[in-house]
Image (cartoon, helix red, strand yellow):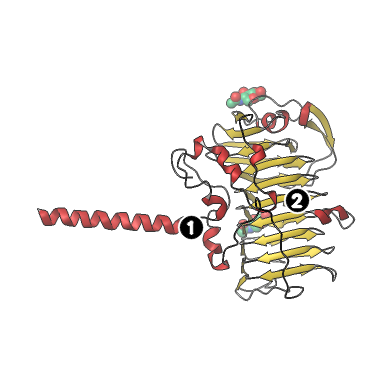
Amino acid sequence: MVAQVLSHFAIAFCIAFVLVSTASLALELNVIDKCWRWNPDWTNNRQQLATCSVGFAGKMTDNIGKDTIYYTVTNSSDDPLNPKPGTLRYGATVISQKVWITFQRHMNIQLKKPLVISSFTTIDARGSRIHISGIGCLLINKVSNVIIHGLYIHHCRSGESGSVMGPNSKIMNFGGIDGDGITVARASKVWIDHNTLYACQDGLIDVTRGSTDVTISNNWFKNQDKVMLLGHTDEYSSDKNMKVTIVFNHFGPNCSQRMPRVRYGFAHVANNLYQEWTSYAIGGSMNPQIMSEANLFIAQKSGKKEVIWKLGSSSKIYSVRDVFKNGASFKATGSGSIQPNYNDQQRFPVANAKSVQALTNFAGVLVCSWSSIC
Ligand SMILES: *[C@@H]1O[C@H](CO)[C@@H](O)[C@H](O)[C@H]1NC(C)=O
Ligand SMILES: *[C@@H]1O[C@H](CO)[C@@H](O)[C@H](O)[C@H]1NC(C)=O
């Protein structure tokens, strides 16, 4: 009897040990996720997320506080000129105060025109599977303090010029639309975290026209030719003030180029997983500064091995503590390094590249249950 109890106890102990050790193995969290994901009561503490951002966006604490409006999307329909209360467009565009947007249930949202996002808007899809596609898609234009978290964004298509409801309930006209997943233009303090982006007509994320203070973290980019463009055109030299942090993302499989491609500005590219590229991974022209730090570059078994594509001779493209697999190579412009010179709100510890696989394990949309750890 005693022996039986003891052996039951031993078995229970072993099971508990295995569970705990697999959980802690699987949950080696990066510095952003560690900040909120251990909280099992995350549904009642959604605004905690805004304190977790790192990199050039800094902390997003201007998006939270007592005066924040909570808005729930209940209707997946889209009316670009006359957004109906309950739709995503009404919450993201029409509500001009500080707003925190969540979703009542899983939804597929087909945009008829680009979704224009106002300043001080947070889209927080945690707990729901939200797919966004259609014409556009997300347009973060001439605004600041925007958080995009937890969306599947794909099959975004080009569109003709037209008009759409803009911030402050003013109809605005826009030129032709390229068909990018997220366009950040003339905008600052933008945090794009834990989204899954793929198969858009043009690119997945564009940061252009003098935008700055942007962090792109924990996203999963796949099945795309041109992934990410930082810097509008060769003529648009005010992009030299652009500062973007790209951290803990998973690029690939089936991506060809621009992870990212940088013109003029400064990109700190750290602790990302690169799972094959068919053309190049990181590119630069018009004298950009790119600091590649402790990324894991896994080249295809046969095919392109070189990470870098560059034009011109004055770019600064450095590699520090990166790890290369399958013969991947990195043509740096020298053996130096450049510091992002982060302030206290932006600074974060860059992990050893050996941890990148674990730290990007949860890149893309998180599957969160409403009642436990997300
Ligand atoms: C969503 O809004 C549209 C347009 O107002 C309406 O026709 C439709 O019935 C609504 N759907 C739901 C599920 O409320
Ligand atoms: C690779 O990505 C392209 C472009 O989005 C897509 O058309 C193709 O189906 C993808 N291939 C696979 C094997 O998923």
Q: Can you give x and y, in whole percent of width and height, for residue 180 in the image? A: 74, 48
Circle 2: residue type: Asp
Circle 1: residue type: Glu
- In this rendered view, identify the residue nearer to me: 207 or 181: 207
The answer to whether residue 10 is above or below residue 94 is below
Q: Can you give x and y, in whole percent of width and height, for residue 325 in the image? A: 59, 73
- In this rendered view, identify the residue nearer to me: 12 or 161: 12
> Does ligand 2 reach within 8 Å of label 1's beta carbon?
no
Q: Visible in this render: residue 67?
A: yes
Q: Earlier in the sequence, mark 1 or mark 2?
A: 1
Q: State yes or no: discs 1 and 2 in contact (Cβ < 8 Å).
A: no
The residue beneath circle 1 is 28
Label number found at residue 206 = 2
The answer to whether residue 274 is above or below residue 362 is below
Label number found at residue 252 = none
As helix, strand or loop, the secondary structure at mark 2 comes to: strand
At 67% from the left and 38% from the top, the residue drawn is 62
- 68 to the left or right of 371: right
The answer to whether residue 311 is above or below residue 180 is below
At 87% from the left and 55% from the top, the residue drawn is 237
Q: Estimate how packed mark 1 is, as few (under 14), some (14 to 19) or many (20 or more) residues with alpha carbons within 10 Å.
A: some
Asked which quadrant contains residue 163, the reply is top right
Q: Visible in this render: residue 136?
A: no
